[in-house]
Amino acid sequence: MAVSLTEKAANHVTGFIEKRGGAAGLRLGVKTSGCSGLAYVIEFVDQVEDTDEVFESHGVNIVIDKKSLIYLDGTELDYKREGLNEGFEFNNPNVKDACGCGESFTV
Amino acid sequence: MALLQISEPGKSTNPHEHRLAAGIDLGTTNSLVATVRSGSPAVLVDEEGESLLPSVVRYRADAQPQVGRLAVAAAVEDPHNTIASAKRMIGRTTSELKTLHEVLPYRFDNELAKIPRILTADGPRSAIEVSAEILSELKKRAESSLGGELTGVVITVPAYFDDAQRQATKDAARLAGLTVMRLLNEPTAAAVAYGLDQGSEGKYAIYDLGGGTFDISILHLHEGVFEVLSTAGDSALGGDDMDRLIAEWILERCPCELSGNDSEATFLRQLMLVARETKEALTTQESAEVEIDMPGGEKWHTQLDKTTLDSIIDPIIDKSLLPCRRVLRDAGITQDDLDGVVLVGGSTRVPRVRERVETFFRCEAYADVDPDSVVAIGAAIQADILAGNRPADDMLLLDVIPLSLGLEIMGGMVEKIIPRNSTIPVGKAQEFTTYKDGQTAMSIHVVQGERELVTDCRSLARFELRGIPPMAAGSGRVQVSFKVDADGLLSVSAREMTTGVQADVTIKPSYGLTDAEVEQMLRDSIDYAEEDMHARMLAEQRVDADRTIEALVSALEADGEAFLDEEERDRLTAAIDSLRTLREGHDADAIKQSVEALNALSEPFAARRMNAGIHSALAGHNINEFGE
């Protein structure tokens, strides 16, 4: 089981962590909510928990709790720019259906 | 596919519930919008990659208004419909704008209107509407950059903006469909951008030299709270003045005769442009080439080195240091008490400015953040906190009011309730008593200013408290409370203590003061301190005289015949008349002596009335029966 970052996403994450003044890593996860079942979580990490798995990708520690990992296995996180908007995008092979905006999904 | 941002631990929002927030620097010349993305503040750019939006709006018949660079480009051909510097007009009345009419190329509607409107091809427009257009444009930019609707914004205003100007700014935001979470003072925003709120405690100077305005503020940070200790500035000082001096220097040297007619306008515009470019080149170089296309067609060259430039612009810097001295004095501190000076505004890129400011304040300047963006960035950080996207303890920002707030008391005097430079939010209450027997209403006149007499201060609002139960003079107690909220908006309420009847007012846009006027008012209060003291003494003695006369006249009417013989009555009447005459004069001491003399003279009368009163009370009779 693994989750990774594209190099571009890793560069942005490293930059954001640096500006924030440090973090133990980047937490990816899912929570039950949203119009289509599950929603992504993307947060800075201050404290790694016992129930977390940690992956390293392009120098960034990706922290995922074991429950979320089932839904995120094989996901690659990318950083994209669309017009004036920019941000992270989950390329998650487990997704069967997503809501129109892509913010929540079902597996 | 939605693009996601990194949240703080535990702060992830549900889909479609992102709390998008932005900070807006609504400037006189340029405006900016910034936001915090994945924890890092950044200025948002438009499709062309430009961050600065010129604060210019052009109205057209049958078409959407143009905002920004398009409007600037049209300014020359369509001056009446292209509105710039709306910030200078916002929250002002027509009469207050009259002084500015000379320099404003606009046609205003009805001179008598409270809110002045500029006549444009698209109908009359107020400064609030113009500002709303600029804000809408920034809102559009922010929402397409963030991919969603904005929850709320923080808009910055100059520290000296009064209640009316702040309210008008909020109105403009509402018109643009924005929710204002907070108005933030520009210097405070700059300090937030440098994270001074996160660091150690201390006092900082914020030196803001823009294109056409200069502001200086002293901030004090203690226990995580920002407090603006004092502010001052010059509303007509900035980088444009440097350009003008440089242009004059070039003109003195270049071999051309100017006749002053219109055909030279292009040449002069070019001269200003070259001056500006030269100034900018010399921020990094030791010397720069100046090239001018002469009116005749040939080119003319010269060299300008950094040392010469420094001597050319020094007068501008000198001028900015005067208000700097004043804020230190107002804050009651010296340079040694400062922990740093923050540079804001494009003109602080000039190395000489930085050097002189550091020398003056005897401390190192904060200049790492782009001085054009620093205010918007601070606003964005504050907006992010207010929207609840940060785990950090809420940072509480405190500002001050620029002029004292008070109310009119008998005799046209001012009773200050909240002194100037009080930190806001602030609330203060004071109790007043009725002046006359049976008084059932009290008129509350709210004023702003430092002088002792109402006529020398600025009137903010008037309202009446009615329904006071009739009581003897001095028995009716009315508590007047002044409250200034975190946005600097004032509300005043008056409450009669025995019955609880209440009346209140919130100060809405009706007037405005420039910082120059605020300065003038402050200076006057010092210059006229002695006159004011005399005027106040005179007014006080007059009030005293009126009260004495009134009490005595009504007593004479009631009991004069009963307790006094004719000679005594005549003597008292004569004394009252002489006091009346003196009261109209200007000798406070004479009025005082006369009041004392009258009091002494009427003492036996008062004593007799009192005895009779006691007697009648004991006997169970009323005083009228004694008269018979």
Image (cartoon, coloured by chain):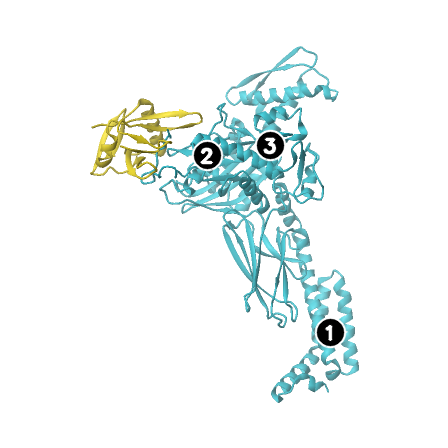
Disc 1, SS: helix
Mark 2, residue position? B377
- Rendered-image quadrant of the C terminus of chain B: bottom right
Q: Is label 2 or label 3 in front? A: 2
Q: Nearer the viewer, residue B551 or B498?
A: B498
Taking the view exactly as shown, the residue that stands out farthest to the top is: B298
Point out residue B38 in the picture as x, y percentages from the top left corner.
37, 33
**Which of the marked residues, 1 or 3, is nearer the chain's N terminus?**
3
Above/below status of B602 relative to A102: below
Mark 1 on the same chain as mark 3: yes
- Could you tell me how far apart the alpha carbons at marks 2 and 3 are, in whole angstroms? 21 Å
Disc sitting over residue B553 in the figure: 1
Chain letter, colour yellow: A
Mark 3, residue position? B212
Above/below status of B441 relative to B204: below
Q: Nearer the viewer, residue B66 or A38?
A: A38
Taking the view exactly as shown, the residue that stands out farthest to the front is: A97
- Other-residue count near label 3 (Cα within 10 Å), few / some / many at <14 / 14–19 / ≥20: some
Disc sitting over residue B19 in the figure: none
- Could you tell me how far apart the alpha carbons at marks 1 and 2 are, in whole angstroms? 68 Å
- Which quadrant of the view contains residue A36? top left
Chain B colour in the picture: cyan
Point out residue B182 in the picture as x, y percentages from the top left corner.
48, 43
On screen, residue B145 versus residue B97, left or right, reads left
Q: Label 1 sits on what residue type?
A: Val
- Which quadrant of the view contains residue B213? top right
Disc 3, SS: loop
